[in-house]
Image (cartoon, rainbow, N blue to C red):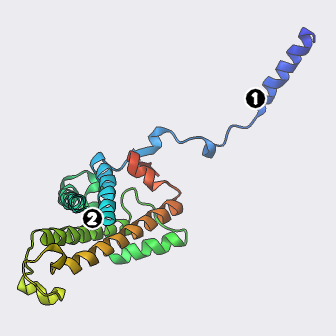
Amino acid sequence: MSRTTVTMIMADVMMTEAAAPAPDAASEPKPESKWVKVWDPFVRIGHWLLLIAIATALITRGEPESIHQAAGYFVAGYVVFRLFWGIAGPEHARFENFLASPFAAFKYVADLVTGKGTRHLGHSPPGGLMVIALLMVMSLTAGTGMAMENHTPVPAAFQSVLQIEDRGRGDEDDSPWEDVHEVSANLLLGLVFLHIGGVALASIGHRENLVRAMVDGKKRAE
């Protein structure tokens, strides 16, 4: 092949590349500036440790008792910390940032199902309500568990409300708090599955990986 032929081929290639259309901006990876930090390390780490603790408590169900109790005390400690962090934490961790009405939560879910859901950088309205519900049920579950362990009698004012009878200071299996503890633990399990379903639905609806966001703390800015 002569030098002239090679030169002509190279010239044709250069002309072809110059005439090629620019790559579609939508296909290019989003630069780091398009992502913002949403979840702080305390929220992220606490979220996954809490998941492990709840799973441990539900799996053991008192056997072995020491592990079950340790998981329960961790849950109780997390509730206390989250209440503090909901007031003193960064923007997206504070309660004032995500408290919403049940109507707003229902409207968000309805819009999301129809493809018109408004994306929230922090917690969505149902996500915010789920945080509150989980904290309340975790408090009840951990509190009744500790009442069983310490053989705490049921206050007279609560006996009629809870429809339980104080049978005295027997062992944990005969504690008047046992039924309440069992019901609250099952309710907690139901909320966990509902939370997982909500995360999956929002991830699909907004086309973003919310699980990954709870790992690295980052979400799309827009």
Q: Is residue 207 above or below residue 148?
A: above
Question: Residue 63, labelled with which disc?
Answer: 2
Local SS, label 2:
loop
Q: Nearer the viewer, residue 175 or 138?
A: 175
> Which x, y percent locates residue 112?
50, 69
Q: Is residue 185 above or below residue 49?
A: below
> Which x, y percent locates residue 76?
19, 62
Q: Say if residue 99 shows up in the picture.
A: no
> Which x, y percent locates residue 188?
31, 71
Would residue 80 be found to the left or right of residue 168 on screen? right
Q: Which residue is mark 1?
A: 18
Local SS, label 1:
helix
- The amino acid marked with disc number 1 is Ala
Q: Is residue 42 above or below residue 104?
A: above
Neighbourhood count class around disc 1 (C-alpha, 10 Å): few under 14, some 14–19, many 20 upward: few
Q: Say if residue 16 shows up in the picture.
A: yes
> Which x, y percent locates residue 145?
18, 69
